[in-house]
């Protein structure tokens, strides 16, 4: 890659426009007559719920899908994009939500292999010089010689963007680029990108659902709902309330239950100096000590991969505890089935089909995981009686409004929100003393999110001690009574919610405390 | 010689044995390493090894040129690799199951075609004498080194260099570590894996020809005794690094030479036990290098055992 081609200052951003883009999958219209115009050098936000058609739209633009109808213009010239390679050739690049870097290759190797004209024998001396010169032309800084698996999420995300710039892509589609970053990392990255659009070096189309990022960085916004454009305009002309109404439409959203005051502060769950290793036998969590009282939600904030999943695994008995004790009501607790039952410990987490359900077993069977070995479902030891199991499942399905054709439907055929509701029904229908929840609303639509959060507050009001681990800071801010921040396997910050704010928590998440 | 001629003899015999016995290990493990780097496991290399031994011996017998035998053994190996690579490309096919089938297929085919070559004697590979400076016959004999061993060292160094410094090296590593990333780069994942498996088969075939054409130096049905399978363990032990593959092959070779070396100084008690040393070593290495609480370090991310 010649350096002249990447020199800054030259106005080389490109504008892209779709006209009447429609995509029909079988009987489902995923995109319906979508026209958006992203002017060159602008920062355009694409808002919408899950399933609103955002990904379908950008996949059509990138050539992964062929639109059923509609066309695309680059710099006002109509273009054909039969495959992703064609999009790349037009200068359109995409940064995906999941990383597309090769973990065992270094940053330099990842950049060089991404090129079309990688030489057969690579002269690393020369390439290193060229890469350093290229990095000088961008505001991003990433270590070049470390395998990508050793980089932080923020560095990986920067490297993904660098890769697109290195390939000379001047129209970048970013798919929820900040979902794995700390607020500070996100601000830094978006700020730098914003600067590049202002300088005319870059055009950005960003898929997001974070209004804060839209109002802070985007120039224009388009809102999609059920495959249609339901609103668009300059960001400065729109309020967050207007944008959110466009996104959600007329759906009924359950109001969050009011938080009742909890008079007595009775200690329920105590974690005392927990240590555990990760899969590489390196310390994953160190000296985790937390106290959660009855009727309290303790929210653990943090960027993913800082030990939260290992902590959840320890608490649910999936990972060996190396050191430390867990106490419930000051009595020692081991996370095994009999004790969970005795101490009334329940929990649920993100992606229930992967984590807490057996996808091919029926809804009724999945709902009976906590009770199948007890009367009435199991009248004698080791025997299962399907009639009471189905009866119980029918009751739960009605009470929790799970949409399923029958109790015998494999649970994997339900929509994400309904799977989570079925699990909620299983975990919350009895008496709950301790509730362990991890990213409960990940990937769900607004109505389900509101429902699940309201259920969590209900449990709190009924006196359960709740440990909530979430990568979504807004969720913590909404639900938690006490907030703790986890960073590199340790609790680095803890405060009652009333005495802290987003910025303080964000700094703690980034390791500044 | 020192005070203990017995010990010296054993050490010298083990050194010589390590060089002789390690060569097939080295070739098969380099082939397996390359295949695994591209994201597939080929357990069929045991069959490839045996078929290489048979075909190399047969060609050498018919043409009188052992080197032509080595080449043909390699080519047969890459045919086996091509079959493995092609079958694994089909949907819902598991590379490990195909590998086991290929292992049985290769050995069966070799036994079938190899019957007529058990009796006759074919020209064997020459060796290079590096021991002419010594007047000790044992030293001179130990330093009779086959060119294939040297070729194996060169190959290990070349692969180590090429995986870092060439486009194809990076493409293979990319394919083996993250197929989605490779696809995003426009790499034909199946083609890269097919070619890597073919190259791996070529090396394994050469390793087989060494067995029949140099050491032990004749074609019998019990020739291989599982070297092709042990090479898989060896690759894990070597952490997918070609240079480590060389040292691991030497270690396995020395372990394999332990029994005969002890016998050469008259210790025949426990002969079969010492002959089992490579297998015991394989077990110990697998136990030591794996743990239920840890995932394998350095393993290519696409391997079906690590996924």
Image (cartoon, coloured by chain):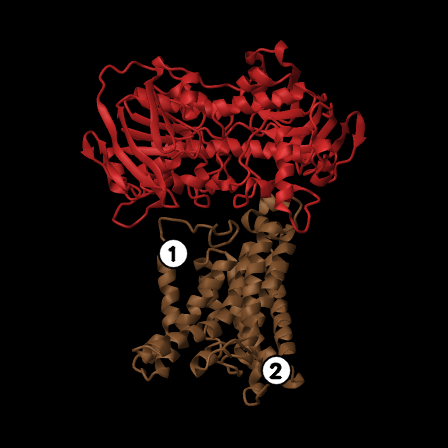
Q: Nearer the viewer, residue A411 or B51?
A: B51
Q: Nearer the viewer, residue B5 or B230?
A: B5
User: Marks 2 and 1: same chain?
Assistant: yes
Q: Quadrant of the N terminus of chain A?
A: top right
Q: Is residue B187 left or right of residue A107?
A: right
The color chain A is rendered in = red
Q: Quadrant of the C terminus of chain A?
A: top left
Depicted A365 relative to depicted A402: above or below: below
Label 1 CA crowd tier, 10 Å (few <14, some 14–19, many 20+): some
> Circle 2 sits on which residue?
B58
Q: Nearer the viewer, residue A202 or B17?
A: B17
The color chain B is rendered in = brown
* Residue A28 can be seen, yes or no: no
Residue A51 lies in quadrant: top right
| Residue at 25% across, 41% down | A338
> Circle 1 sits on which residue?
B289
């Amino acid at each position: 890659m010649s350096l002249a081609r990447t020199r800054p200052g030259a106005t080389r951003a490109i504008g892209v426009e779709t006209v009447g883009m429609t995509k029909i999958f079988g009987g489902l219209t995923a995109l319906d007559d979508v026209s958006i115009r992203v002017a060159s050098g602008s920062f355009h936000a694409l808002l919408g719920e899950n399933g609103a058609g955002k990904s379908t739209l950008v996949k059509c633009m990138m050539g992964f899908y062929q639109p059923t109808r509609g066309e695309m213009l680059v710099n006002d010239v109509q273009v054909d994009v039969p495959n992703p390679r064609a999009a790349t050739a037009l200068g359109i690049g995409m940064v995906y939500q999941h990383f597309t870097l090769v973990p065992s290759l270094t940053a330099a190797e990842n950049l060089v292999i991404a090129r079309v004209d990688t030489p057969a024998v690579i002269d690393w001396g020369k390439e290193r010089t060229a890469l350093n010169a290229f990095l000088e032309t961008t505001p991003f800084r990433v270590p070049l010689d470390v395998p990508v698996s050793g980089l932080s999420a923020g560095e990986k995300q920067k490297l993904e963007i660098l890769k697109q710039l290195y390939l000379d892509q001047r129209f970048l589609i970013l798919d929820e680029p900040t979902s794995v970053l700390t607020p500070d990392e996100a601000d830094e990255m978006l700020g730098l990108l914003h600067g590049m659009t202002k300088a005319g070096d870059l055009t950005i189309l960003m898929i997001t659902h974070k209004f804060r990022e839209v109002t802070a960085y985007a120039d224009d916004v388009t809102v999609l709902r059920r495959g249609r454009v339901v609103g668009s305009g300059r960001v400065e002309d729109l309020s967050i309330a207007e944008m959110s109404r466009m996104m959600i439409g007329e759906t009924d959203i359950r109001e969050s239950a009011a938080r009742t005051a909890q008079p007595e502060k009775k200690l329920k769950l105590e974690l005392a100096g927990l240590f555990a290793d990760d899969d590489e036998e390196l310390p994953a969590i160190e000296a985790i000590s937390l106290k959660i009282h009855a009727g309290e939600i303790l929210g653990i904030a943090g960027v993913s991969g800082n030990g939260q999943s290992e902590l959840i695994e320890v608490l649910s008995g999936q990972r060996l505890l190396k050191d430390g004790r867990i106490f419930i009501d000051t009595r020692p607790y081991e996370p095994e089935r009999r004790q969970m039952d005795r101490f009334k410990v329940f929990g649920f987490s993100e992606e229930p089909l992967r984590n807490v359900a057996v996808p091919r077993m029926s809804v009724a069977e999945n709902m009976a995981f906590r009770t199948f070995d007890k009367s009435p479902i199991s009248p004698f030891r080791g025997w299962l009686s399907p009639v009471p199991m189905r009866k119980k499942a029918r009751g739960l399905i009605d009470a929790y409004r799970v949409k399923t054709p029958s109790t015998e439907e494999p649970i994997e055929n339900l929509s994400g929100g309904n799977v989570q509701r079925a699990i909620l029904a299983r975990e919350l229908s009895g008496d709950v003393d301790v509730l362990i929840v991890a990213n409960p609303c990940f990937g769900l639509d607004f109505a389900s999110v509101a429902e699940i959060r309201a259920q969590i507050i209900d449990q709190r009001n009924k006196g359960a001690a709740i440990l909530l681990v979430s990568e979504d800071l807004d969720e913590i801010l909404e639900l938690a009574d006490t907030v703790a921040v986890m960073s590199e396997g340790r609790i680095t910050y803890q405060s009652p919610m009333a005495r802290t704010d987003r910025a303080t928590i964000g700094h703690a998440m980034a390791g500044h405390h | 010689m020192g005070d203990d001629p017995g010990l010296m003899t054993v050490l010298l015999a083990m050194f010589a044995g390590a060089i002789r016995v390690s060569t097939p290990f080295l070739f098969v493990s380099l082939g397996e390493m390359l295949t695994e780097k591209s994201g597939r496991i080929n357990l069929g290399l045991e069959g490839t090894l045996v078929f290489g031994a048979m075909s190399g011996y047969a060609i050498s017998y018919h043409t009188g040129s052992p080197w032509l035998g080595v080449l043909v053994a390699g080519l047969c190996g890459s045919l086996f690799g091509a079959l493995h690579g092609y079958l694994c490309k089909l949907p819902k096919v598991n590379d490990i199951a195909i590998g086991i089938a290929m292992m049985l297929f290769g050995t069966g085919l070799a036994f079938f075609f190899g019957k007529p070559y058990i009796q006759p004697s074919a020209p064997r590979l020459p060796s290079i004498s590096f021991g002419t400076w010594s007047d000790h016959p044992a030293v001179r004999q130990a330093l009779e080194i086959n060119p294939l061993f040297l070729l194996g060292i060169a190959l290990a160094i070349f692969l180590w260099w090429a995986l870092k410094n060439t486009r194809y090296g990076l493409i293979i590593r990319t394919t083996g570590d993250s197929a989605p990333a490779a696809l995003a780069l426009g790499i034909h994942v199946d083609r890269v894996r097919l070619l890597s498996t073919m190259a791996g088969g070529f090396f394994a075939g050469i390793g087989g020809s060494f067995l029949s054409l140099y050491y032990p130096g004749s074609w019998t049905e019990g020739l291989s005794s599982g070297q092709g399978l042990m090479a898989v363990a060896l690759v894990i032990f070597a952490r997918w690094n070609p240079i480590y593959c060389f040292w691991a092959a030497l270690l396995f070779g020395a372990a394999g030479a332990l029994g005969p070396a002890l016998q050469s100084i008259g210790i025949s008690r426990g002969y079969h036990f010492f002959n089992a040393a490579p297998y015991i070593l394989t077990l110990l290495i697998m136990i030591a290098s794996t743990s239920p609480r840890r995932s394998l370090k350095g393993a290519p991310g696409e391997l079906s055992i690590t996924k």
